[in-house]
């Protein structure tokens, strides 16, 4: 449980707020019963006893929002939370000071007013009652897909590199071969930039796999091809849906509020298991991350295709 979740639970344990039927966006352990949890991150979803990847609608007396380190995602979630609670309902937000919760509290106070606030565990919890005011239109707009790059792409807050083409992915795209064929996959597809580059004439099927449900929503819009299928999976814990002739990956070493290569190493291991004999694995990663020993241990051959002193593109053959 994060410190922000602990602070949120303290608000109810202390009696500052009374529990009611509620939803919980970006949910972790709920602080009381009668809560419908929404969690679009597959690893966090699997930790919850009961959850949904997306709450569609409803008129709730209370809503809880666990804030993230991404400002635009917080704006979008507060605006959506506001739309889900009934008039007179209470919206409760909790986040870490290190992630900018105090600044966000001030912006919410200015836009919508606050009932009260509490500081605990180096976190802020603040709550407000739904009246006639509406969140700023910019916040409300962030809940939908947004144009990215040359505007032929769509993305939304809550996805890695949501508002731009990641430099590492762009480098990998320039070094993909022109002879991809058969059943291929993008492990950690994000909003679909690399996957679209993979749809070459000889490709018969493309699996787009990501642990973030929001990413798959965007990828479906960006890769409208009958050969594509979309899978919400945590490849560090769940098996890939098939074996592949080729896999492309920009390993997601950023997870939750921490940055670690361990998740990327788990994805590499999953790729080695999911490739057919002779299958090819194309990967881009920050050159300082310790992936090379695992690649050499897991694949028959490993070759560097590009190195620009920030990112390294590698081809490995099973």
Image: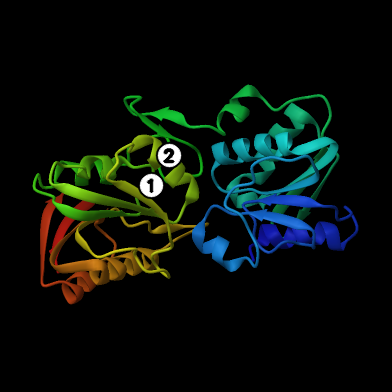
Quick check: 60 above or below 238? above
Residue 31, located in which quarter of the rendered image?
Answer: bottom right
Nearer-N-terminus badge (1/2): 1
- SS of the residue under disc 2: helix
Residue 120 seen: no
Residue 258, percent from left and from top: 49, 60
In this picture, residue 247 sits left or right of residue 65:
left
- On residue 316, the disc is none
In this picture, residue 284 sits left or right of residue 123:
left
- Marks 2 and 1: in contact by CB < 8 Å? yes
Residue 198, located in which quarter of the rendered image?
Answer: top left
Residue visible at 75% across and 56% down in the picture: 35
Residue sitting nearer the eye, 233 or 253:
233
Q: Quadrant of the N terminus?
A: bottom right
Find the distance from the CA under tag 1 to the CA under tag 2.
8 Å
- On residue 190, the disc is 1
Residue visible at 61% across and 41% down in the picture: 74
């Amino acid at each position: 449980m994060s410190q922000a979740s602990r602070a949120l639970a303290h608000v109810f344990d202390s009696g500052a707020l009374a529990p009611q039927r509620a939803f919980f966006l970006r949910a972790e352990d709920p602080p009381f019963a009668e809560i419908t949890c929404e969690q679009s991150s597959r690893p966090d979803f699997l930790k919850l006893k009961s959850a949904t990847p997306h709450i569609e609608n409803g008129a709730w007396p209370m809503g809880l929002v666990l804030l993230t380190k991404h400002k635009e995602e917080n704006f979008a979630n507060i605006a959506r939370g506001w739309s889900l609670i009934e008039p007179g309902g209470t919206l409760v937000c909790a986040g870490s000071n290190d992630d900018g919760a105090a600044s966000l509290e001030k912006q919410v106070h200015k836009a919508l007013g606050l009932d009260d606030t509490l500081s605990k565990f180096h976190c802020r919890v603040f709550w407000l009652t739904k009246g006639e005011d509406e969140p700023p239109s910019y916040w409300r707009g962030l809940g939908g897909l947004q144009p990215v790059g040359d505007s032929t792409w769509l993305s939304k807050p809550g996805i890695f590199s949501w508002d731009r083409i990641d430099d590492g992915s762009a480098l990998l795209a320039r070094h993909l071969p022109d002879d991809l064929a058969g059943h291929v996959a993008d492990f950690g597809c994000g909003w679909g930039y690399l996957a679209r580059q993979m749809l070459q004439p000889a490709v018969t099927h493309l699996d787009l796999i990501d642990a973030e449900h929001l990413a798959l929503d965007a990828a479906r819009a960006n890769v409208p091809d009958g050969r594509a299928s979309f899978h919400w999976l945590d490849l560090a814990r769940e098996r890939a849906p098939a074996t592949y002739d080729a896999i492309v990956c920009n390993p997601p070493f950023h997870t939750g509020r921490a940055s670690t290569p361990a998740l990327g190493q788990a994805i590499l291991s999953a790729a080695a298991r999911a490739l057919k004999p002779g299958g090819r694995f194309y990967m881009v990663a920050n050159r300082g991350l310790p992936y090379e020993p695992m690649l050499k241990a897991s694949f028959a051959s490993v070759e560097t295709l590009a190195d620009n002193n920030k990112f390294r593109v590698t081809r490995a053959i099973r």
